[in-house]
């Protein structure tokens, strides 16, 4: 079994676009989904180059997580 403090890394694939968001979905696998469906604002996906696939890292606060400016 993996370490409980190890961050979760989830890959999501673009499913569809709505007026202001892009819906990404986690592919089905042998385990229950971690996120399932994630809606991201279109302006944010444009900043990333309109990707077909994104990665999301989830870690517990206080385990080295930093804010957008690199500050804890």
Image (tube, rainbow, N blue to C red):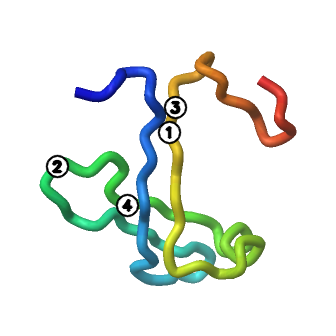
Helix, strand or loop for disc 2: loop
Disc ID at residue 31: 2
Residue ID for mark 4: 37
Earlier sequence position, callout 4 versus callout 2 = 2
Which label sits in the foreground, 4 or 2?
2
As drawn, 10 above or below 68:
below
Residue ID for mark 1: 58
At 62% from the left and 16% from the top, the residue drawn is: 62
Earlier sequence position, callout 2 versus callout 1 = 2
Earlier sequence position, callout 4 versus callout 3 = 4
At 50% from the left and 83% from the top, the residue drawn is: 17
Quote the CA–CA distance across marks 4 and 1.
15 Å
Task: Please state the horizontal and vertical placement of residue 11, each as a whole percent of the image.
Answer: 43, 61
Earlier sequence position, callout 3 versus callout 2 = 2
Q: Quadrant of the N terminus?
A: top left
As drawn, 17 above or below 48:
below
At 76% from the left and 34% from the top, the residue drawn is: 67
Q: Residues within 10 Å of mark 4 (few under 14, many from 20)?
A: some
Helix, strand or loop for disc 4: strand
Q: Quadrant of the C terminus?
A: top right
Disc ID at residue 59: 3
Q: Residues within 10 Å of mark 3 (few under 14, many from 20)?
A: some
- Left or right: 49 with respect to 21? right
Quote the CA–CA distance across marks 2 and 1.
17 Å
Q: Residues within 10 Å of mark 2 (few under 14, many from 20)?
A: few
Disc 3 to disc 1: CB gap under 8 Å: yes
- Left or right: 68 with respect to 29? right
Task: Please state the horizontal and vertical placement of residue 12, each as a whole percent of the image.
Answer: 42, 65
Which label sits in the foreground, 4 or 1?
1
Earlier sequence position, callout 4 versus callout 1 = 4
């Amino acid at each position: 079994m993996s370490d409980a403090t190890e961050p979760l890394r989830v890959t999501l694939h673009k499913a569809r676009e709505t007026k202001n968001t892009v819906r990404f979905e986690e592919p089905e696998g042998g385990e229950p989904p971690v996120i399932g469906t994630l809606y991201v604002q279109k302006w944010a996906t444009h900043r990333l180059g309109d990707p077909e696939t994104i990665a999301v890292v989830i870690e517990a606060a206080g385990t080295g997580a930093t804010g957008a400016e690199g500050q804890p």
